[in-house]
Image (cartoon, grey):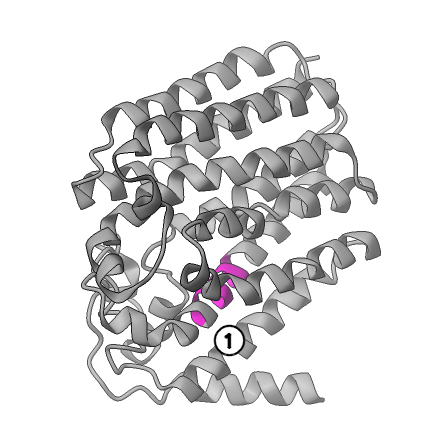
């Protein structure tokens, strides 16, 4: 009854926005949020980053990769069902995380050119409305989580501490991207747990490697805001690494590919996994080669290209399971 009441109240808040909706600075051009969504819902879709879906993909990929990694040579309807659940969960919980992040960072966001058009600093959504929307999204995420086995549920709940602390890390360390890596790759543990009902080294290695993948792509992303961040006192790896960013990206991505290689060996994937994985490595190498850390458009393009990278790794895992 309490959950239903929270959900009803949260839904009711969706219709309280009074201001016109401004397109977010780095939204995907032609996004359905601004073209087709009801006007009253647009601020909340912006809060959930529906106009910038790349983050949902980046949260989803470790879940899907781990699910296939745990398939043990047999990709079944059950695996596909779990992957569908993870897609819903990633969409919802990425939105919840961003909503929470925007509540905490509302003063910082208003001082940064790229983020001042977000719904809270732009005045499109009040703090109370944002909290209501956060509750609504969390209820959906919880409904997805309880479809899993008990061990996977407990593993999934373990991520909440990481999510809660993340927005504050940029205030105390130049490496908040490392904390984001711990948070965003948690699905590598949940996916394996959902299939096997246990925790094993392939999943742990995938999770550890994912930390370095996130360090890479989010450092590229952070270079968009480095001037504003320096002025307002926000810390990031972009500021910490500066001109050493490209060598650092090479190291981060190299460690991630090495982790994917090790996870494949431990999971006894078929030999075809490795040449396809090599293509994924070339994709990351191309990111490092073409990024211009002083060009925000280049940084955003490289960041978004990790969607394609995720598909290559997914293909490698699928073939590695099906062709033994």
Image coordinates for residue 37, horizontal then vertical, percent? 31, 69
Q: Is residue 61 above or below residue 184?
A: above
Where, quadrant-wise, is the N terminus in this rendering?
A: bottom right
Taking the image as shown, residue 227 lies to the left or right of residue 318, namely left
- Whether 96 is among the magenta residues is yes
Q: Residues within 10 Å of mark 1 (few under 14, many from 20)?
A: many
Taking the image as shown, residue 113 lies to the left or right of residue 16, namely left
Magenta highlight: main SS: helix
Q: Is residue 229 above or below residue 319?
A: below
Quarter holding residue 216: top left
| Pick the front one: 12 or 182 | 182
Q: Is residue 208 visible?
A: yes
Residue occupying image coordinates x 69% and y 44%? 189
Image coordinates for residue 221, horizontal then vertical, percent? 32, 46
Residue occupying image coordinates x 71% and y 12%? 324
| Pick the front one: 170 or 86 | 170
Report the number of discs.
1
Image coordinates for residue 251, horizontal then vertical, percent? 44, 26
| Pick the front one: 295 or 278 | 295
- What SS does tag 1 mark? helix
Residue where numbered disc 1 is placed: 134
Q: Is residue 29 visible?
A: no
- Whether 72 is among the magenta residues is no
Quarter holding residue 193: top right
Residue occupying image coordinates x 25% and y 34%? 243
Q: Is residue 231 above or below residue 271?
A: below
Please provide the residue range marked out in magenta.
Answer: 91-99
Residue occupying image coordinates x 50% and y 51%? 180
Q: Is residue 225 above or below residue 96?
A: above
Image coordinates for residue 176, horizontal then vertical, percent? 45, 53
Quarter holding residue 103: bottom left
């Amino acid at each position: 009854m309490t959950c239903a009441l929270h959900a009803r109240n949260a839904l009711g808040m969706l219709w309280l926005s009074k201001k016109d909706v401004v397109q977010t600075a780095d939204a995907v051009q032609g996004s359905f949020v601004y073209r087709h969504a009801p006007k009253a819902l647009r601020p909340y879709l912006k809060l959930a980053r529906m106009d910038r879906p790349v983050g949902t993909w980046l949260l989803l990929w470790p879940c899907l990769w781990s699910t296939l990694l745990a398939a043990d040579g047999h990709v079944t309807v059950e695996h596909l069902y779990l992957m569908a659940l993870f897609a819903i969960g990633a969409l919802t919980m990425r939105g919840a995380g961003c909503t929470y992040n925007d509540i905490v960072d509302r003063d910082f966001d208003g001082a940064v050119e790229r983020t001042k058009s977000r719904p809270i600093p732009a005045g499109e959504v009040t703090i109370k409305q944002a909290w209501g929307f956060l509750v609504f999204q969390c209820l959906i995420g919880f409904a997805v989580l309880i479809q899993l086995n008990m061990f996977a549920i407990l593993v999934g709940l373990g991520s909440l501490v990481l999510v809660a602390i993340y927005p504050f890390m940029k205030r105390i360390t130049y490496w908040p991207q490392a904390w984001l890596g711990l948070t965003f790759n948690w699905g590598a543990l949940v996916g394996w747990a959902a299939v096997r009902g246990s925790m094993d080294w392939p999943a742990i290695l995938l999770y550890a490697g994912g930390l370095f993948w996130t360090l890479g792509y989010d450092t590229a992303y952070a270079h968009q805001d480095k001037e504003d961040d320096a002025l307002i006192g926000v810390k990031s790896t972009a500021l910490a690494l500066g001109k050493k960013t490209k060598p650092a990206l090479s190291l981060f991505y190299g460690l991630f590919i090495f982790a994917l290689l090790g996870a494949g060996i431990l999971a006894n994937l078929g030999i075809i996994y490795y040449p396809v994985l090599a293509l994924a490595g070339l994709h990351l190498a191309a990111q490092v080669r073409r990024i211009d850390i002083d060009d925000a458009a280049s940084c955003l393009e490289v960041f978004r290209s990790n969607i394609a990278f995720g598909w290559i790794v997914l293909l490698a895992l699928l073939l590695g399971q099906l062709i033994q």
